[in-house]
Image (spheres, rainbow, N blue to C red):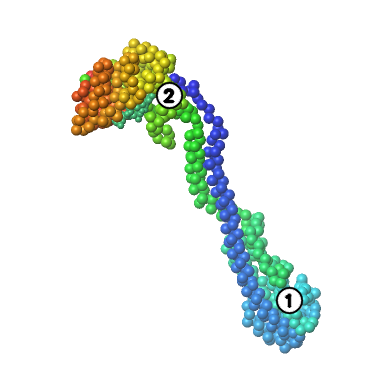
Amino acid sequence: MSTSGMTVRVPSWRYLPVAFALVVPVLLCVGWTWLHAKSEQRHAAEDAAKIVRVQVENILSQAWSLLDRVADLTPQPCADVLPSLQRWSALNPYFRALVLANSDHIYCSSVIGTVDFAIGDFRKWPIDGTPDQWLFSVAGTPLAPDRPAILLGKPGAPGYSGAVAVDGRYVLDLLNAVATLGDYRLELKVGKGTPIRSDSWQGSAGPADLIYEEVTRNNGRVALSINVMAPWESVVSAWQQLMMSYLPAAIAIGAGLAFAAYRLQVNRLSFKEQLRRAMKADEFQVCYQPVYGQKTGQCEGVEALMRWNRPGVGFVRPDIFIAAAEAEEMIIPLTQHVLRLIERDLQTWQTPPDFHIAVNIAPEHLSSTGLVPEIQAFRANIASRQPLIVLEITERSLISDNGQARRNIDALRAEGVRVAIDDFGTGHCSLSYLQMFPVDYLKIDKGFVHAIQPSGEEAPVLDVIITLAHRLNLAVVAEGVETQAQFDYLTSRGVAFIQGYLFARPMPSVEFVPWYAGHSPPGAQRA
Ligand code: C2E
Ligand code: CA
Ligand code: CA
């Protein structure tokens, strides 16, 4: 039989779920780690913004309370209040200058004493911007035009107001320190003023994303707004790190799922297709169980037993897959395949002529018209070893016969092939068939053999079967012989052949060859 003629094309889309099962966990891992890296980064940025806010609010609250005292000094002349302004400015950290203004002129400054600055000269210093108090950040003040500051002011006596300038250096240092926490670029805006930015804001040129924005309000007006930005690469590298730690697990899960999907897919292939593929893939093997001949005290033959070693599954029980193959009408191609395997194995054997090779033949096969030419071809292919071929058939085959089985048996026996009735006594046994069908051996099922007691008590049914077989001139083969007591019982009753674990277990051809060499007398083997 050429199994290559039975090639089954498996559509590749069938394996789409397998690919899907492999890819989905990996994609999920990539997506999830990306989102996770983004959210981690946002959380860290939120913490950074919080540090800035708390510290700036702390500075501002000190500034507000100082401002109250400064505004209270109006409308006193500068000379009278200057010592107080200077002392407060020196004793309180953060402040660059404390000033007093009269309508649109600053008339007193803690830094330079009596002055006369038109407020209009102050760059963008809208001292009269809001009626009660105001607050904003500026890029510079007249005394330090290049250093940012936060200005706070409030009205004092009618027509007068007080103001304090918080030095932006403190805020800048704070922003720079916090920026190092996560490669951030930070920006603080007070009121509607000029933003104060960390050095990293100007320093780095690459693109950056706004990852967090915090706005606090005071009486409905924006008091502080803090923006945290980070370069695009920083989230990418955090993501890559996360991915590296989760990807192996995702790949492992994907592989597990793909394997499960594959198994599911393979199981969904029809059993017929599976058998065809298995034959093509050489997954079947034949094991040979030696049969002991009572007359010679030697191994006189073997029974060929099929084995299916499925990759990833292991050995499938023969009674299960053979029953399934029979149900799926695959037993004939399968047996044909086994015959090819036996032919291949026999090339390495050194057995003498008439060595028994027993092959199991299913009922459907026995009543097929192709059996005779197939067995003839098989014999021809192994003719160099001149074995004696025994077909093991079941009582079931005899009962269901419509004539073809009988014709096959007659034709094959005429050519020297022997026939054994397997599992005798377990099927719908009808003794009349034994008379109708000319056969050579009766194989007693292991159930009867196991009924033999170690004490040597009689096993009446077994005895009847043995006697019956002998009366019909059939040689008896006892199978499933596991103990010496069983062996002794059977040989004492003239059972010609003994098969079972006591003598030998079924073994693959490579094991059988040395086994046989060690169990046959010198000269029994043929070169
Ligand atoms: P079977 O034809 O009755 O084969 C004998 C079974 O008994 C084998 O089981 C063999 O391994 C097992 N056996 C041998 N000695 C002992 C023993 O001392 N104790 C016990 N408990 N068991 C023993 P296996 O190989 O599992 O085969 C099961 C059945 O599968 C076979 O029963 C036969 O019906 C079927 N089978 C196996 N190979 C083929 C085949 O190539 N073609 C067909 N049609 N059927 C096969
Ligand atoms: Ca058998
Ligand atoms: Ca049997």
Q: Where does residue 49 sit, x and y in percent of width and height? A: 62, 65
Query: Which quadrant: the C terminus?
Result: top left
Q: Quadrant of residue 375?
A: top left
Q: Which residue is tagged 1?
A: 133
Is residue 390 visible in the rendered image? The answer is no
Q: Disc 2 vs disc 1: which is toward the camera? A: 2
Asked whether disc 2 touches disc 1, contact meaning CB atoms under 8 Å apart, the reply is: no
Q: Quadrant of residue 445?
A: top left
Q: Is residue 432 left or right of residue 244?
A: left
Query: Which is nearer the eye, 286 or 484?
Result: 484
Is residue 7 visible in the rendered image? The answer is yes
The answer as to whether callout 2 falls within 8 Å of ligand 1 is: yes
Query: Which is nearer the eye, 67 or 84?
Result: 67
Q: Where does residue 276 sit, x and y in percent of width and height? A: 47, 26
Residue type at the position of mark 2: Ile
Q: Is residue 338 left or right of residue 10?
A: left
Q: Residues within 10 Å of mark 2 (few under 14, many from 20)?
A: many
SS class, disc 2:
helix
Q: Which residue is tagged 2?
A: 331
User: For the point 23% across and 19% down, which residue is it?
Assistant: 523
Residue type at the position of mark 1: Gln
Q: Residue furthest bottom?
A: 80
Q: Where does residue 106 sit, x and y in percent of width and height? A: 77, 80
User: For the point 49% across and 21% down, which residue is it?
Assistant: 5
In the depicted structure, whether residue 498 falls above or below residue 113: above
User: For the point 49% across and 48% down, which residue is it?
Assistant: 249
Query: Which quadrant: the N terminus?
Result: top left
Q: How many marks?
A: 2
Q: Quadrant of residue 220?
A: bottom right
Query: Which is nearer the eye, 295 or 496?
Result: 496
